[in-house]
Image (cartoon, rainbow, N blue to C red):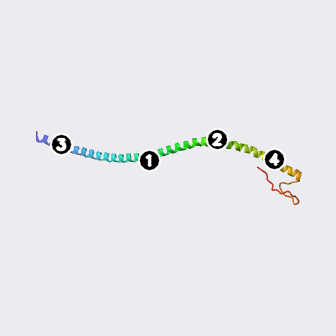
Amino acid sequence: MSHTEFRNNAVKMKNNSSLAGTILTNLENAIMALTREIRADEKGLKDYEQQLYLLNKEKSGLQRKIKKNTQFVEDFDKMIGPFSDKYTEMTKDMAKLYGNAKKHHKNGVMLLVKEFDYHPAFKRRDNEFTASPFMPK
């Protein structure tokens, strides 16, 4: 091997080793960056799992409440429903009864006006009849 060839080979070897060093340094930097990203992802995964745990816990609580409230509604319909229907029926009858009472009250006041000269709006001095006017609505 000649001196020129040796020298060319040495330069090539130096360039190749320098290039290999640069590649290794770049790979080490990339590995360190990836290691940091993996750690960050692992921390993010832990945070995500913790948040998921809390959400599942809340979900379970809400499902229990839904079940309890559904049972309450079913029991309410069974136990209170008939009373509610009876109340509605009774209030309808009360409206009729009250309507009749108003009609008879009006007739009674008209009888007082006709027979006793009663004036519902004011009392007269010589009138023995004492009552305050009342008109049902």
Q: Is residue 117 left or right of residue 30?
A: right
Q: Which residue is mark 4?
A: 104
User: Label 2's element?
Assistant: helix
Crowdedness near tag 2: few (<14), some (14–19) or many (≥20) residues, C-alpha within 10 Å:
few
Q: Amino acid at mark 3?
A: Met
Crowdedness near tag 4: few (<14), some (14–19) or many (≥20) residues, C-alpha within 10 Å:
few
* Residue 134 drawn at (x, y percent): 79, 53
Q: Which residue is mark 1?
A: 54
Q: Which residue is mark 2?
A: 82
The structure residue drawn at horizontal position 79% and vertical position 47%, both measured from the top left corner, is 102
Looking at the picture, tell me which residue is in the foreground, 125 or 83. 83
Q: Nearer the viewer, mark 2 or mark 4?
A: 2
* Residue 69 drawn at (x, y percent): 55, 44
Mark 4 or mark 3: name the one nearer the start of the chain. 3
The structure residue drawn at horizontal position 22% and vertical position 45%, both measured from the top left corner, is 21
The structure residue drawn at horizontal position 33% and vertical position 47%, both measured from the top left corner, is 39
Q: Is residue 54 left or right of residue 68?
A: left
Q: Which residue is mark 3?
A: 13
